């Protein structure tokens, strides 16, 4: 009798052990499943911001949420907003601040900055003036010289500027001007903030793709162009940067000099991404990616992509906004 009771008791204990083990083994799987997201996140806009956002997206999809597809485009800041305003994208990257007319267009659709649309400053970029490696004369220029040579009509009506027009001792060869086209925030920043909204030289060859600009400069001894520091620093084997004198000596753009209070501040600008907070509320993957960008990605990968960081306190403030989305 005692033996039968013992066998029954042991059987019960074994069954209980299996039950506990089974529950314990399934819980983490169920919890992990709940953390896994699927779906798509659509980002477009600035070609300058593209390398940084694409890097963040790649790490996010590889290490954080492999079930989510983050599609990052580089149509340009202005072209990006044209997609973002009608709701075609979740994020709009920009290498300049959103314009009043773009804000008004969003408001017409019930999307207000600071409420339904959140503005996040991601990093700081240094507008970089680049030349061909064979150019041994224009390695240092003043800001005023750069502005004057890019302005229409400074030297002659047809805008065929010679290097010797800028400094008499430089070659009497025609300068070949290059830059990003009007789709890009970099063009708008240069036109509005550097040229003071004055007309650019008519001979400027403006391109959509930054890789094209790099190739054009690398193949022409008399070329000069402007674009973000990231594209320069990743192509130093093909082009070189002009050291710019803002009044206190020539400064070479670098992560140590780019900043709103640093020596290269004259050509420093913030870069942004704009989030449709309505979509972030409706689509968990959009909110999750936004939290990764702000909570880790932007600060971690800025330097690797040629951007100077912004203070952590700023990211903390942005994260508070994201945590309020439910």
Image (spheres, grey):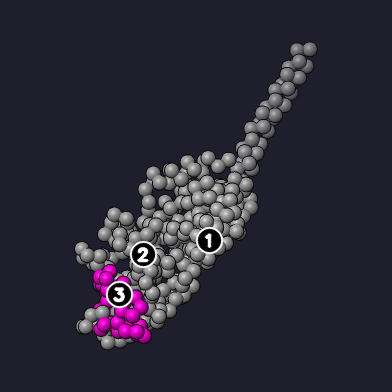
Give the quarter of the image for residue 106.
bottom right
N-terminal label among 3 and 2: 3
- Categorize mark 1 by other alpha carbons within 10 Å: few (<14), some (14-19), many (20+): many
The quadrant of the image that shows the N terminus is: top right
Q: Secondary structure at mark 3?
A: helix
Identify the residue under disc 2: 193
Residue at coordinates 43% horizontally, 79% vertically from top-left? 205
Q: Could you tell me residue 178's position as x and y percent?
A: 40, 76
CB under 8 Å between discs 1 and 2: no
Q: Which mark is residue 326?
A: none
Magenta extent? 136-165
Pick whichever of labels 1 and 3 is earlier in the sequence.
Answer: 1
Confirm whether residue 296 shows in the render: yes
Q: Residue furthest bottom?
A: 172
- Residue 81: mark in rendering: 1
Residue identifier under label 3: 148
Decide if residue 325 is on the left or right side of residue 129. right
Who's the residue at 64% across and 32% down the image? Answer: 24
């Amino acid at each position: 009798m005692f033996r039968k009771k013992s066998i029954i008791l042991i059987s019960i204990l074994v069954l209980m052990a299996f039950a506990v083990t089974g529950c314990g083994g399934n819980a983490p799987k169920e919890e992990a499943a709940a953390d896994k997201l699927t779906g798509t996140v659509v980002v477009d806009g600035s070609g300058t911001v593209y390398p940084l956002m694409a890097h963040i997206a790649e790490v996010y999809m590889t290490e954080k949420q492999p079930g989510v597809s983050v599609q990052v485009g580089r149509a340009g800041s202005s072209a990006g907003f044209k997609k973002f305003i009608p709701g075609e994208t979740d994020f709009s990257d920009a290498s300049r601040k959103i314009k009043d007319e773009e804000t008004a267009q969003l408001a017409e659709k019930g999307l207000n900055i600071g409420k339904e649309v959140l503005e996040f400053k991601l990093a700081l970029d240094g507008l970089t003036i680049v030349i061909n490696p064979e150019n041994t004369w224009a390695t240092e220029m003043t800001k005023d010289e750069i502005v004057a040579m890019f302005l229409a009509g400074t030297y002659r009506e047809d805008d065929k500027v010679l290097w010797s027009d800028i400094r008499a001792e430089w070659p009497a060869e025609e300068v070949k001007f290059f830059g990003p086209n009007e789709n890009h925030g970099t063009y708008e920043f240069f036109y509005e903030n550097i040229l003071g909204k004055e007309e650019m030289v008519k001979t400027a060859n403006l391109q959509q793709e930054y890789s094209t600009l790099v190739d054009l400069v690398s193949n022409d001894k008399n070329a000069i162009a402007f674009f973000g520091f990231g594209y320069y620093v990743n192509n130093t084997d093909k082009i070189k940067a002009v050291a710019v004198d803002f009044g206190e000596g020539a400064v070479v753009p670098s992560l140590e000099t780019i900043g709103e209070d640093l020596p290269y501040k004259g050509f420093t600008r913030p870069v942004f991404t704009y989030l449709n907070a309505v979509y972030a509320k409706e689509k968990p993957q959009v909110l999750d990616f936004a939290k990764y960008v702000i909570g880790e990605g932007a600060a971690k990968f800025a330097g690797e992509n040629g951007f100077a960081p912004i203070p952590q306190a700023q990211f903390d403030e942005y994260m508070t906004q994201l945590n309020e989305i439910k």
